[in-house]
Amino acid sequence: MMQDNRNGMIPFPPPISRDRVICEFPKCYTANASLQLKTDWDPQAKAACKDGAARHQPWDRQKMSKVVVVGDLNVGKTCLINRFCKDVFERDYKATIGVDFEIERFEISRVPFSLQIWDTAGQEKFKCIASAYYRGAQVIITVFDMADIKSLDHTRQWLEEAMRENEPGSCFVFLVGTKSDLLPLDERKRTEKDATRIATEMNAEFWAVSAKTGENVQGFFFRVAALAFEKCVLKDMENGVPVSIGRSNSIRSDRANLEEATPQDSKRSCCS
């Protein structure tokens, strides 16, 4: 938690955990599973690093991107978020009521950056509540159960509903297949082929993950954070806002200056 701001004191966030440092640009899942075949930082972002006028600025609470996670009931949205944010996997299924969120903090080239991850309910009766939180998203993650092909077919509708609250082309879109550990290899390959085709139609990047085993979970969220961070930097540059993305000539991070993080912010619900 941040320190109290009474008496004019400047609030400071807790230190960022060492396992939330992104040093290199994260790779995509597979080369044929994405239209966003980025393997390195944008040249303009790199150029900003070399700008001698760039300076290390204090923490900016505005350096945050909103991530909305949507999908059918029981596809594993909450388990996916909890595996990354808390490194836990709960076998007992509890449906999300309304909307919950987590704030996950990163350090990218000495710049604190946060993802505000919104976990929306998949039940029909909560759709009107959840849809109110789609607006202003920088990232939309559409989730399906790899063991339930019908949930893959429904991802188009979930994306359409989320995009109604956002401007066309304003969001990174990801298609994520969960429970990959439940499928035999041959069936997994067939499902991934179908998902890759749909991801292309959605102009999305596809990932197969397992919240149970942790397979690809960190890699996926690191990819989300890197793309969102870079977009934030480029938008600041476009708007003429001074950008500080490190003092070196490449987008890297100094792990030695980091301290262990304090416990994560407690999970909050808009419907509590």
Image (cartoon, grey):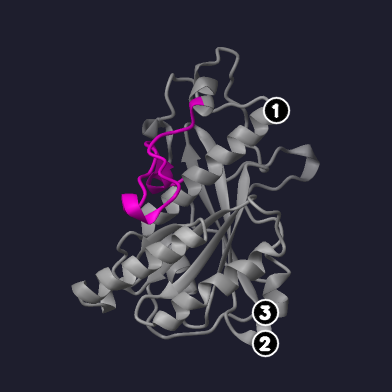
Q: Which residues are magenta?
A: 15-43
Q: Nearer the viewer, residue 104 or 130?
A: 130
Find numbered disc 1 in the image and state the secondary structure of the residue it sits on. Answer: loop
Question: How much space separates mark 1 and mark 2, taking CA atoms?
Answer: 42 Å
Q: Quadrant of residue 8?
A: top right
Kindly identify the residue that appears in the image at 41 percent across and 86 percent down.
92
Find numbered disc 2 in the image and state the secondary structure of the residue it sits on. Answer: helix
Point out residue 89 in the picture as x, y percentages from the top left corner: 37, 73
Instruction: Name the residue at the left extreme.
Output: 185
Residue at label 1? 241
Residue 192 appears in the rendering? yes
Q: Are marks 2 and 3 in contact (CB under 8 Å)?
A: yes
Kindly identify the residue that appears in the image at 60 percent across and 14 percent down.
53
In the drawing, what numbered circle is on residue 127?
Answer: 3
In the drawing, what numbered circle is on residue 75?
Answer: none
What crowding class fits label 2: few (fewer than 14 Cα within 10 Å), some (14-19), or many (20 or more)? few
Point out residue 163 in the picture as x, y percentages from the top left corner: 66, 62
Residue at label 2? 125
